[in-house]
Image (cartoon, rainbow, N blue to C red):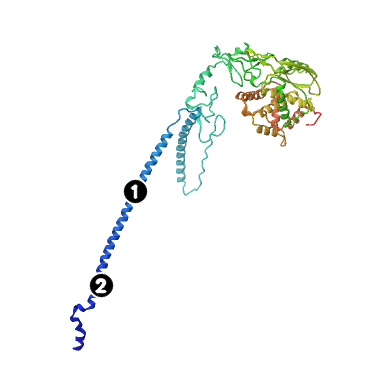
Amino acid sequence: MGWFSCIFSPSTDEKDDPSEDHYKTAIKISRHEKEDGIVRQKREKEEQVAIEKAKEISLKQFEKEEAERRLQESKEEGKREKVDDQVDDEQTQIDRATKESLKLFQKEEEKRRLEKSKEEGKRKQVDDDDKGQFKHSKDKEVALPSICNGCKSEIKDGLSVNAFGDLWHPHCLCCLHCHRPIAMDEIARKGKFHRSCYKEHRHPTCCVCQNKIPPTAEGIKYNEHPFWKEKYCPCHDSDGTAKCCSCERLEPRGTNFVMLDDDRWLCLQCIGSSVMDTYECHALHLEIRDFLEGLFFKVDKEFPLLLVQKQALNKAEQEEKIDYHHEVVTRGICLSEEQNVTSVKEKPKMGPNNTLINMVTETQMVSGCEVTAILIIYGLPRLLTGYILAHEMMHAWLRLNGYKNLKLELEEGLCQVLGLRWLESHTFSSTDAAAASSSSSSNSTPPAASTSKKVDDWTDYEKKLAEFCIHQIKEDDTPLYGRGFKLVHEILVSNHYSLKDTLKDIVNASKSVPVSKF
């Protein structure tokens, strides 16, 4: 009984039991932890909701900004399209032709793609039928390049004009009358003309009398210069209308050609660059000597170069006993006989009514070696004078170096080739001229003398006059000069433009052995 009372005696007072306090404390702590967990879960849930809401707001803001950006881009694109739509009304004929051809190209390209798509569909169907039996690679189709009917070169970038059943570069489709490009909306129905030019082509205006060329029972008859393409009434060839002795054009009514004192006419454009006396020709004489030296045709001897009137030139020709110049108008001669020559010492001055006055002449005896003098008719433009001088200087070189028995047509042809070479050296830049001269002789040939006047400094008429002189040489059909030039030019081409080898072939063809070696 004592043991039990000792054991249970403390339990008689519940307030003093420490285990009860611990239990209460544990329950209280557990309750607080549970409440904290609930609060924490609630807070986490609220935070999750806030995050989701923030994401939704951010997404809406992004979509709004994206919509605003697209709207801004649309406005800017609209502005660019508005600016692009402002096309300049003053377009050149070439621009309009280019625009028209581009539309046509796009239309044809779309048609070509459609046809290609159909062909590929057919090939695919055939390949599907053969699938499992054959395996083969498809060759890529290579479209043939479009060729311009004008220049015969490839049309790139699709910029072409489809006219008269052919493709053209816009700048190659040119009017046959005015030679300017034709826009698609300006092409005449009956030919390659501007609409406005077609009427003039059918019923041309005479370049002399400025009237419409009258029709005849056989239709409209007119003459046309082969180079200048000027049309005129046939009667002006025999009614005394003045013709320029240089460019061969007829005098239009209302203009006054200049008459030289030997009854030759000179147009106002040719007289602007004419060489009128011996002194003015001195610099040109030195230039031609340098040019020939650059081709290994150096003329060592000194002899006079004289500008003379037509009468003096004819007299010298008779004394030289030259009887083959009847087929052409003599404008220069290389003398080998001793004789008196009257030359132009001081050029004439322009008087009233475009007449020349106060020309001073002098007479002198020319003599010496195989070449006594070179005579050139006065009053011709510098380019034409230089070509004639180069021709005659080649005659001088041949005589001074023993080439005296060459076939006449081959000798004249060779001299024409040298004259042409000098003219062509004036149609390129000085660098190109030197290169052309160098390649014509040998790889070690020194460059020919540069021209005294750059091509850029020429007037448009001087450039055209150079083309005219070259055209005259190449299209000459006379038996001596024309045929001789064509024969020698063929020899020159066969020798790769080597003048040295060409001369050897001329010697062999003439069966002549020169005294001195080339």
Residue 305, horizontal then vertical, whole percent: 74, 22
- 381 relative to 36 in the view: left or right: right
- Mark earlier in primary sequence (1, 2): 2
Q: Quadrant of the N terminus?
A: bottom left
Residue 389, horizontal then vertical, whole percent: 71, 24
Amino acid at pointer 1: Gln
**In this view of the protein, which residue sits in the foreground, 4 or 424?**
4
Identify the residue under disc 1: 61
Compared to residue 217, the image places residue 506 above or below, namely: below
Amino acid at pointer 2: Ala
Compared to residue 57, the image places residue 194 above or below, namely: above
User: In this view, which residue lies farthest toward the front?
Assistant: 16
Residue 26 tag number: 2
Compared to residue 486, the image places residue 122 above or below, namely: below
- 507 relative to 268 in the view: left or right: right
Q: Residue at x 54, y 31 (%)?
A: 148
Q: Secondary structure at mark 1?
A: helix
Q: Residue at x 22, y 76 (%)?
A: 20
Residue 478, horizontal then vertical, whole percent: 69, 20
Task: State which quadrant residue 49 falls in.
Answer: bottom left
